[in-house]
Image: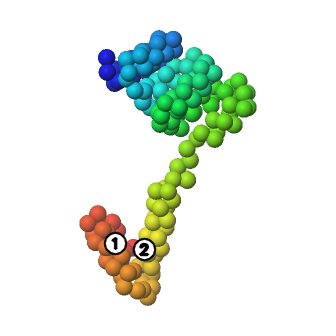
Amino acid sequence: LDSPAYNLLIHGFSHIKSWRMALHLYTEMTAKSIKHDAASLRGLLYGFHQSKQWQKAMTHLLLARQEGVKIYNHHVHFVLTGAASSVAYDPIIYLLGMIDDPCNDVKAVYDREDKERRKRHRARRLNDLPSDSISDCNRTIWLVEDLVFGRKLYD
């Protein structure tokens, strides 16, 4: 079997709450030198989540992190909901630290700043404020965008 087949089987067994079989397939991947990925980890954690085995999910989440598997927020969510239902404060605090906040992403910050800059320039264009050559160039580009994409130019 290859990685997508294992992932499919792990997800299938997880959905029927057979975490033992999902875990067996997950460890079999290791035995056959097939690298775990985010999809196989998600399937395994979902099986633990379905069966309310959050301690096992926490263990495998940390092991996968050590192996270099990319940990996404949905992985942390499965373990966090189980730990929260058991009121296990130390694991909850640790897991909250693992959550990846997209607002701290450099690209997201740049996109927000770029969006704000574009809004300001559009407001200047609509208000016919005096401008410099860079703003004139930007206004021309946005006018072309408005014409090409069929946006409403004037009220």
Q: Are marks 1 and 2 in contact (CB under 8 Å)?
A: yes
User: The residue under label 2 is which amino acid type?
Assistant: Arg
Q: Position of residue 121 (x, y in %)?
A: 43, 75
| Disc 1 to disc 2, C-alpha distance | 8 Å
**Left or right side of 62 for 143:** left
The residue where tag 1 is placed is 142
Residue 17 visible, this orientation: no
Along the line of sight, which residue is nearer the eye, 130 or 70? Answer: 70
Task: For the C terminus, give its image quadrant.
Answer: bottom left
Q: Point out the tag, 1 or 2, that comes first from the N-terminus.
A: 2
Q: Considering depth in this image, is 128 or 3 the residue closer to the camera? A: 3
> In the structure shown, which secondary structural element does the residue marked by tag 1 occupy?
helix
The residue that label 2 is drawn on is 122
Q: Is residue 139 left or right of residue 110?
A: left
Indicate the secondary structure of the residue bearing disc 2.
Answer: helix
> How many numbered dots are placed on residues in this image?
2
Residue 51 in the image: x percent, y percent? 57, 16
The label shown at residue 82 is none
Q: Residue at x 45, y 85 (%)?
A: 129
Disc 2 crowd, CA 10 A, few/some/many (<14, 14-19, 20+): some
- Name the quadrant containing residue 122: bottom left
Relative height, residue 78 to residue 24 (above, below): below
Residue 19: x, y in percent?
51, 14
